[in-house]
Image (tube, rainbow, N blue to C red):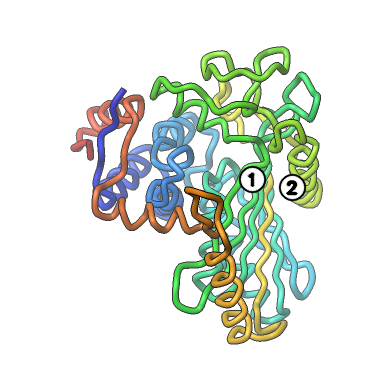
Amino acid sequence: MTENNADLDALYDFCDTILRAAGADAPSALAATRAMLHASSLGVDSHGVRLLPHYDMVFRGGRLNKTPDLKFTRKRAGSGLLDADDAHGALAAYTAVDHACDLAREAGIGAVGIHRTSHFGPAGAYALAMAKQGMIGVVMCHSDSFVRLHDGAERFHGTNPIAAAVPTQDGDPWLLDMATSAIPYNRVQLYKSLGRDLPHDTASDLYGINTRDPNSVEMLAPLGGEFGFKGAGLAGLIEIFSGVLTGAKISPEILPMGGPDIETPRDMGAFVICIDPDGFIGRGLMLAGMDRYLSALRTSAPRDGARVIAPGDREWQEAARRRKTGVPLDPETTAAFRRLARDAEITSPI
């Protein structure tokens, strides 16, 4: 099946318009659009604009608060809790980022736990927002159970992503954005739409046996293949930060992202950590150290026919390409966009 390309600016306007038509207030629509376009720009298509039909549905269904009143409570010099009031997860995360950066400028490090939040899409978007302020950013969240434990045969953890971003002297930030499952579930949906087989050891059937058929997937495998205890353990750490430390539900208690209940808020949690280099060796020395580190990494000897890259290098290259060629949309997303455009009586970007 083929993909169609859409212009980035047109996608931004379309997503923002559709979410406002669903009743979302301006901050919610802008935050969700900003996060989706971050992912689609960098080639993280599983968490990009293909999420728009879902967000439209849960805003209209009542799961998300269309006009949330987010409240931040500072607990210590460098820590606090954000009550997201069942907002869109992107609005909650960007709000927490701003508070964490303010705390870090004063205390050297700022940590903000988020509760009563929802699906926030690409964790890297929020880590990057801190790096663009000259900070080191770490972001994590949990989600509803969809990943088996190592040697497990039922869903337990969510995909529980973690992301980190570090500024550099002259180039784009170092950017790590990963799920603790072998792949995110949206990747399964994407491969199903494209008619592709999944990679080995990434998803399992009803009995916990790995399968490459996206139509047979009942749960995801933890990161690590035969050594999946590492991915399951890391998912557990993120569960503690995002669920236990924030007072939110834990993964087995969270309603499924895909429904059928799209009216009840999910009470998810997330966690944001911001580190000000000036609270340690100083921004100048940190940037110089990052340059030395990345220079050594990128000139490290590769295997025959391969190339050594740092986290984020592929994404920045893809972003430059997509600024010129547009964002590829799979057939399922293209059809959904055209339906949304008809319903809103606007022009589809594809």
Q: Amino acid at mark 2?
A: Ile
Which quadrant would residue 156 be assigned to in this image? top right
Q: Is residue 33 above or below residue 310?
A: above
Q: Residue 195 vs residue 8: left or right?
A: right
Quadrant in the picture for the C terminus: top left
- Would you name the residue on which mark 1 appears? 161
Q: Is residue 133 above or below residue 71?
A: below
Q: Is residue 101 above or below residue 311?
A: below
- Would you name the residue on which mark 2 appears? 238
What residue sits 45% from the left and 36% below the top?
Answer: 55
Q: Is residue 57 above or below residue 249?
A: above
Image coords of residue 145 (percent x, y): 70, 29
Image coords of residue 105 (percent x, y): 64, 80
Q: Nearer the viewer, residue 85 or 163?
A: 163
Which quadrant would residue 235 be assigned to in this image? top right
What residue sits 46% from the left and 51% below the top?
Answer: 35
Number of numbered callouts drawn: 2
Question: Are the residues at dot 2 and dot 1 in contact (C-beta closer than 8 Å)?
Answer: yes
Q: Amino acid at mark 1?
A: Pro
What residue sits 65% from the left and 15% below the top?
Answer: 205
